[in-house]
Amino acid sequence: MPNDTFRTAIVRKPGSNFARGLTTFKGPPPIYEKTLQQHDDYCTALERCGLQVVRLSPDLVYPDSTFVEDTAVLTHDFAVITRPGAQSRMGEVDSIRGSLMRFFHEIREIKDPGTVDGGDVCQVEGHFFIGMSQRTNEEGARQLGRLLAERGYTSSLIDIRPIKDILHLKSEMAWLGEDKLAVSQALAGFRDFCKYELIFVEAEESYAANCVRVNENVLIPAGFPKFAAALARLGQKPVPVEISEFRKMDGGLSCLSLRF
Ligand code: CIR
């Protein structure tokens, strides 16, 4: 059953070796103190949206493990532990499984040779868009689609592999509630999105398309005034959160939490 009201978020504090994670960014590395401050501010923003935030300890074995969204896909009824597409991140799921068992009775898994990163999965009420990307392969996407179908959810596959410079489907799109999707120009052409009202995010602000609707609010990265104004015009409540240090590691707002 679809449920678009969130009560809880799971986050993981970044470890001191956060800067050793995967990234395509060529500039200066993230500053750890600043990273921690921004993570705290992110948690506070979630709490202000009414969520209980479950904070997991840093996991120094996996420098990217603060990007918890990639390790699971959560529905109202059950959780799916993913099989992340980057070799260095595959083991991140082991500790997430334990945390999710506190909240979910039914936990399913993506199996080898499938790979899925949660950042490729966008839920829109009872439907899931599943991106096939550099990280999520077709086998993984189809496994996830079958698991969802067993519980009455529908899904469609969105192949973003030919699109340059997009890590995950949700790197440049988000559901904004009702029939509204925020999409970058790069993703706007997919036929699967045409029955929705598309809120276009201009090329220079495409990073902001990775926003997170949390109940009445929409968390957006700080520094994207045009998108913030567009949301306000739609009657949404944009909440800017500074995440510059996470951007340096190719991360966005959504990947910092699992929400349910
Ligand atoms: C990675 O490359 O896997 C991490 N450095 C960033 C993951 C970002 N996750 C996401 O957008 N869902």
Image (spheres, rainbow, N blue to C red):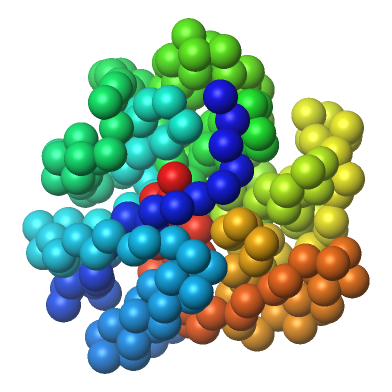
Give x and y (percent) for residue 104.
Answer: 29, 32
The answer to whether residue 84 of the structure is visible from this angle is: no
Which quarter of the picture shows residue 102? top left
The answer to whether residue 43 of the structure is visible from this angle is: yes
Residue shown at the point (37%, 61%) measured from the top left: 52
Which quarter of the picture shows residue 127? top right
Residue shown at the point (20%, 35%) measured from the top left: 101
Residue shown at the point (66%, 34%) measured from the top left: 125
102 on left or right of 28: left
Q: Is residue 118 above or below residue 8?
A: above
Give x and y (percent) for residue 155.
Answer: 62, 21
The one of 215 and 70 positioned closer to us in this rendering: 215
Which quarter of the picture shows residue 112? top left
Figure label count? 0
Q: Quadrant of the C terminus?
A: top left
Residue shown at the point (17%, 57%) measured from the top left: 62
Q: Is residue 140 above or below residue 7?
A: above
Give x and y (percent) for residue 99.
Answer: 19, 45
Give x and y (percent) for residue 169.
Answer: 59, 44
Q: In which quarter of the image is the N terminus?
A: top right
175 on left or right of 57: right
The one of 60 and 19 positioned closer to us in this rendering: 60
Q: In this view, does 154 lie above or below 207?
A: above
